[in-house]
Image (cartoon, grey):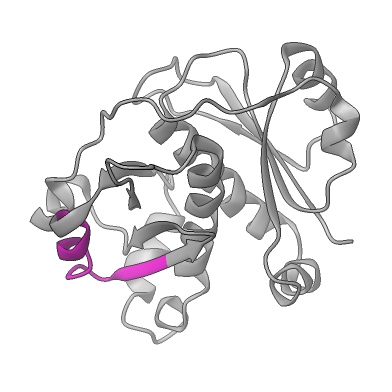
Amino acid sequence: MQLAARVPKLEPPGETAICEVTALAALALLDHPWAAQDGPWHEAVTIWDGRRIRKIVRRARGAAWDRSHETDGVTTERDGVAVRAFVPCQTDRVPEQVRKLQIQTPPLDPPVVVADADDVRGRSGLVIAVTPEFELSWGKRAAQCAHTAQLLRRSAGEECYATWVATGRPISVVHPSARAWAELTAEADVDVHDGGFTEIPPGTRTALGWLRNA
């Protein structure tokens, strides 16, 4: 799945906000009626969902962002941050409007580190913790958050997931300290191990996730 975050030159969003909206965008596409049985996106989504569910997050702005909407997908916006998730396809068939968008991008405002594991335990909604053990680009972190959200969607159960949707899809992406991360790894509902295609070795644990309705 290709995703594009709108990152203007002036006053770009912070990394954590992009991670959160990227996760929501991936879920919005999966939940879209056109991805359901008999929908026009169903076959593409089903084929992708049954494989590695790889995600690539790109940067878009200005006219390039506008052109990206010519490609099938869903745009999610929250608090001024916008991310578009495109209908999955093979990497050699990515539409030109998306393929031209940059992957390697300058850093954004760094995330705030959460030192206390109880801060994470006390949060409700969809909660994602990103590894402190590896230095990742913001696009890579956002992709890991989207991956975590998709695994939580699978594992949570229909009633739990429906309650989360009905309450406005609350989400928190947190960046724990090394000590907090070590405490939380045994408690997660899901954990993500990267395929190793970019930036980090295969099998690296990159994110943890919980879905807790208040």
In this rendering, does residue 95 appear at all? no
Give whichever of 109, 53 is nearer the camera: 109
Residue 18: x and y in percent read: 48, 45
| Residue 79 inside the magenta-drawn segment | no
Expressed as whole percent of the image width and height from the top left, the position of residue 103 reads 25, 35
Asked if residue 61 is positioned above or below residue 165 in the image, the reply reads above
In the picture, which quadrant includes the C terminus?
bottom right
Name the outermost residue toward the left: 96
Q: Residue 65 lies in magenta, yes or no?
A: yes
94 left or right of 96 in image: right
Q: Residue furthest front?
A: 10
Q: Quadrant of residue 157?
A: bottom right
Residue at (53% x, 21% y) in the render:
203
Residues rendered magenta in the picture:
64-75
Residue at 67 percent of width and 52 percent of height = 152
Return the residue nearer the eye: 50 or 4.
4
- Relative horizontal placement of residue 125, taking residue 204 as reference (left or right): right
- Give the answer, above or below, for where 60 lies relative to 136: below
Which of 95 and 8 lies nearest the eye of the viewer?
8
Residue 29 pos. (x, y %): 44, 68
